[in-house]
Image: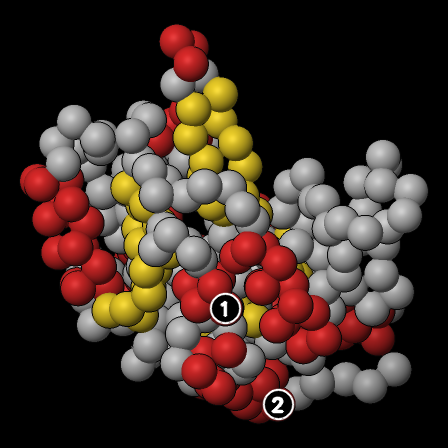
Amino acid sequence: MRTTSRRQFLKLLGATGAGLLAGRPCAARGAGTVNNDELGMLYDATRCVGCKACMAACKRVNRDSGGLAYERAPFDQDKLWDAPADLSGNTRTLIKLYKGPQNRWSYIKYSCMHCQEPSCVSVCPVSAMTKDKATGIVDYDKNKCIGCRYCQIACPFSIPRFQWERKAPQIVKCDLCRNTNLRGKGLPACAEVCPTGAITFGRRGDLLRDARGRIEANGGRYVNYVYGEHEVGGTNHLYLAGVPFPRLGLPRLPAEAPAEFSERIQHTIYKGFIAPVALYGMLCIIALRNRKKRESKGIQEEEE
């Protein structure tokens, strides 16, 4: 059995510590700050007529590059319609109908919120989830993904979906048509085809001003709140609606981003690299003590 000298052990200890010091920083940055120059979307539920043209366009444009597929309804024996019941490994944009009391109803769109401080990016151990610094787009790289699905657990909006039925599965979520419609036409496919202007694409700051202007001009039409302005540090996908947002499936969330909280803990524990140094120091002491015990035991056996 190969033995390790004290010098070799200390060299290994030093090399390990240096490696940890050079490790990649957490991906999500800029805690507490909002960048209103990032790209985003404003969905106005009061303008949506439920035509689902956005869903069809999303799947048509991103089907090949995003690994999407049509989902047939059980009643559709002729397989004519794409009828997903929820976001899935085949669908990354969804329109649903909310029916409430007193004949109140509303459509609602679900897709990635493109958070200012995305938890999916913060927890991804291999940087398969990334946030573009210039555009703010939260993107996914299937070639880096190891399938841990931490992004699914971390997302406060339960957006990322996994292709469980595929032999080579990947995570599915909106990327604002970054490599398809946005690159070719300058806007996502859903915003391009919406016939009523329910989906507006642009800079977050411009969308916020637009949203506040609509509320001010049509006070009775809207809930007096822009969803996404503050939730989990702010999102780039913003919402206006005439029905309280929790009824539409948009959760009540704190203003602080979970990524900020977790990274603050990490930075506190690892501040000055005190905790790792203390840990490795303790391991060094234990190793040296065990070595001395073995050496003393060997000397006693030789004397006997």
Q: Quadrant of residue 68?
A: bottom right
Instruction: Say left or right for 52 vs 170.
Output: left
Q: Secondary structure at mark 2?
A: helix
Disc 2: which residue: 8
Q: Visible in this render: residue 20?
A: no
Disc 1: which residue: 189
Q: Seen from this angle, which residue lies furthest top? A: 102
Instruction: Say left or right for 133 vs 142.
Output: left
Kindly identify the residue that appears in the image at 33 percent across and 38 percent down: 46
Q: Are marks 1 and 2 in contact (CB under 8 Å)?
A: no
- Could you say which is closer to the camera, residue 49 or residue 240? 49
Instruction: Say left or right for 138 vs 216.
Output: right
Q: Secondary structure at mark 1?
A: helix
- From this view, report whether residue 26 is shown above or below residue 143: above
Q: Position of residue 44 (x, y in %)?
A: 32, 45
Quadrant holding the C terminus: bottom right
- From this view, report whether residue 7 is shown above or below residue 72: below
Q: Earlier in the sequence, mark 1 or mark 2?
A: 2
Quadrant holding the N terminus: bottom right
Q: Position of residue 267 (x, y in %)?
A: 31, 62
Q: Visible in this render: residue 207?
A: yes
Kindly identify the residue that appears in the image at 80 percent across and 40 percent down: 73
Kindly identify the residue that appears in the image at 22 percent across and 33 percent down: 222
- Could you say which is closer to the camera, residue 170 or residue 186? 186
Q: Seen from this angle, which residue lies furthest front? A: 195
Kindly identify the residue that appears in the image at 27 percent across and 52 percent down: 234
Residue type (three-letter) at the residue carrying disc 1:
Ala
Residue type (three-letter) at the residue carrying disc 2:
Gln
